[in-house]
């Protein structure tokens, strides 16, 4: 047993003893948790370390990650339910390590046997010339030649004994411990060891066709012969493991949310007294057609149309839960696709930037939900179908559709998020390819222009509808609103002051500030750890998604001044670009899957 195996055995014994002792100790609450955590760390610290390294290296969903997730999940459930039953999590890890120990021991024994088997390869063959023995390479011996095998030497080639008697050790080939006696006329195979007597053997096969060569060939090529099945298992695991993890998360979230959602299912239209139920939660109640107001107003928010239809089926609270569930599912799916596309180095930046937007508020506010869902859907589609999108509709058209739908559902909350987040992921995907700086810049600019055209076209369509319904007054109202939104927001505040006020929504919160500094430190540490010999200049194109929300806020400073509580979310795209810059500057040629 090797040193590592002995250490593992000691850890198993110590953990087992600790578990037995803890069953009889009268401790509860925090001391009990600390004691069981100590036992857990004794047996599972190496698994946690390997799982962390796997996540950093892009191999998140392996057996170490699953074991860490399962056992830590058991601890979390014990803490959540306040049951104090931490034994299950430790027992799973303990039995896993016992299995790993047995496997390691078996593999070690097999390696020893293979090493012993490799010793059967003969180094030379004796050929008698002019009464003297001459050592030659076994490959040079022709079929029908006479070779001489002296006591203690290996039989180099298959053949027939011409003269002499001897005992042969065949244990390396057959496993038989008793020697085999041979005499003149007996067939003999290569790889045996001559224990006594001198044998003259007429060869019947070349060295490449001899028994020892075929055995060694099977041993040396065993791994390649298994490659097809191993490749299938690897491909299957890449799909199965993430699917199981995501299914588990969704199951834990979906069951309570769906139960809440469908408990309020309505089978008919709202009664007259509930007619304003949807209007009470809409930002602008005159944004949709109803018997008592103007069909189209200067603010036409498409989400209110969807809201009125959905509230025929669900209560407001249940609809909030469904939207929150949809956002969570899309977030997890996007992160999974980032791992699959070898963009795991961007996950911390993506997660923190989205966290700054307050995801619960995005899911619970019916005005914010469409923008966040469109942005996440765009990210996931781009990660999953980028080659197909490039070949079919084209990426600029795809971004134009994003801008069009964002403008339809909501106008000025934080629409730039739907541009900056997908654009950052597009730049990250392209840095995995051989596209030039100029080619990537042209592609990114076309996508920005496409988004802007889609956004503007939908706005134009709304102007046209206003004109059809309200005539010239509708167009004048729209023009007034554009002029108002493009104004500086009053004499007391400059555009730069309003931009800084939006930024301070994030930086003035202590928790956000700590997270911001921690992420920047982590990304800088990873950048230094990579020690790149050269930087990828294409990453500088992240300035586009970084500047887009800044310019948007400066241009619409009046709106950003009046509605800072939600317009600051536009700048979270700039945070994502800033966080992603260190990761993309260091070149990583790992191709996306």
Image: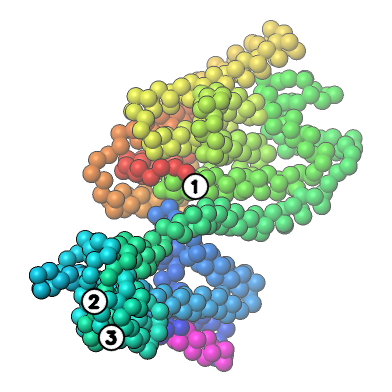
Residue 404, percent across and down?
60, 24
Residue 530 visible in the shown view: yes
Number of residues whose C-alpha sits closer than 10 Å to that of mark 1, classed few (under 14), some (14–19) or many (20 or more): many
Q: Dot 3: what SS?
A: strand
Residue that mark 3 sits on: 166
Upstream in sequence: badge 2 or badge 1: 2
| Label at residue 340 | 1
Residue 152, percent across and down?
22, 83
Number of residues whose C-alpha sits closer than 10 Å to that of mark 3, classed few (under 14), some (14–19) or many (20 or more): some
Residue closest to the eye, 338 or 452? 338
- Cα distance in 3D space between marks 2 and 1: 63 Å
Residue that mark 2 sits on: 200
Q: Which residues are magenta?
A: 13-24
Residue closest to the eye, 214 or 544? 214
- Cα distance in 3D space between marks 3 and 2: 11 Å
Mark 3 or 2: the one toward you: 2
Position of 318 with respect to 341 (left or right) is right
Q: Residue at x 43, y 37 (%)?
A: 429
* Vertical position of residue 576 compared to residue 47: above or below: above
């Amino acid at each position: 047993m090797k040193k590592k195996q002995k250490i593992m055995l000691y850890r198993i014994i110590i953990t087992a003893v600790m578990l037995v002792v803890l069953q009889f100790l009268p401790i509860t609450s925090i001391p009990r948790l600390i004691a069981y955590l100590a036992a857990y760390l004794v047996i599972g610290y190496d698994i946690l370390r390997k799982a962390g390294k796997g996540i950093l290296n892009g191999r998140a969903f392996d057996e170490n990650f699953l074991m860490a997730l399962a056992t830590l999940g058991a601890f979390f459930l014990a803490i959540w339910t306040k049951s104090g039953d931490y034994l299950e999590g430790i027992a799973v890890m303990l039995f896993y390590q016992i299995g790993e120990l047995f496997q390691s021991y078996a593999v070690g024994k097999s390696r020893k046997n293979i090493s012993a088997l490799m010793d059967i390869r003969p180094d030379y063959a004796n050929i008698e010339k002019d009464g003297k023995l001459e050592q030659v390479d076994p490959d040079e011996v022709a079929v029908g030649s006479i070779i001489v095998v002296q006591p203690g030497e290996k039989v180099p080639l298959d053949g027939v004994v011409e003269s002499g008697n001897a005992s042969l050790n065949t244990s390396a080939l057959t496993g038989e411990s008793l020697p085999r006696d041979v005499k003149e006329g007996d067939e003999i195979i290569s790889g045996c060891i001559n224990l006594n007597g001198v044998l003259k053997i007429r060869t019947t096969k070349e060295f490449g066709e001899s028994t020892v060569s075929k055995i060694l060939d099977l041993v040396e090529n065993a791994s390649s012969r298994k490659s097809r099945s191993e490749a299938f298992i690897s491909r299957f695991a890449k799909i199965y493991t993430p699917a199981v993890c995501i299914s588990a998360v969704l199951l834990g979230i979906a069951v309570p949310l769906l139960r809440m959602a469908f408990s309020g299912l309505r089978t008919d239209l709202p009664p007259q007294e509930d007619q304003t139920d949807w209007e009470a939660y809409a930002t602008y109640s005159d944004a949709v057609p109803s018997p008592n107001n103007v069909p189209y107003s200067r603010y036409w928010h498409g989400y209110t149309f969807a809201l009125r239809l959905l509230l025929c089926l669900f209560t407001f609270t249940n609809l909030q839960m469904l939207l929150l569930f949809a956002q969570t599912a899309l977030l997890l799916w996007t992160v999974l696709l980032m791992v699959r596309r070898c963009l795991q180095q961007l996950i911390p930046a993506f997660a923190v930037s989205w966290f700054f937007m307050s995801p619960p508020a995005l899911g619970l506010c019916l005005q914010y939900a469409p923008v966040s869902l469109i942005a996440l859907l765009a990210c996931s589609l781009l990660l999953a179908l980028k080659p197909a999108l490039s070949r079919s509709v084209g990426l600029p058209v795809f971004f134009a559709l994003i801008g069009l739908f964002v403008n339809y559902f909501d106008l000025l909350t934080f629409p730039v998020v739907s541009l900056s987040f997908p654009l950052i992921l597009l730049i990250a995907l392209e840095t995995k390819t051989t596209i030039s700086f100029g080619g990537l810049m042209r592609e990114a600019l076309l996508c920005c222009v496409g988004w802007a055209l889609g956004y503007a076209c939908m706005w134009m369509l709304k102007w046209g509808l206003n004109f059809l319904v309200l005539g010239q007054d509708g167009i004048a109202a729209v023009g007034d609103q554009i002029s108002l939104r493009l104004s500086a927001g009053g004499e007391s505040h400059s555009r730069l002051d309003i931009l800084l006020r939006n930024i301070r929504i994030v930086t003035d919160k202590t928790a956000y500030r700590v997270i911001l500094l921690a992420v920047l430190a982590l990304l800088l540490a990873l950048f230094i750890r990579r020690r790149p010999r050269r930087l990828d200049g294409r990453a500088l194109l992240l300035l586009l998604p970084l500047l887009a929300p800044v310019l948007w806020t400066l241009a619409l400073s009046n709106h950003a001044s009046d509605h800072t509580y939600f317009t600051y979310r536009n700048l979270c795209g700039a945070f994502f670009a800033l966080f992603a810059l260190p990761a993309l500057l260091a070149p990583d040629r790992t191709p996306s899957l």
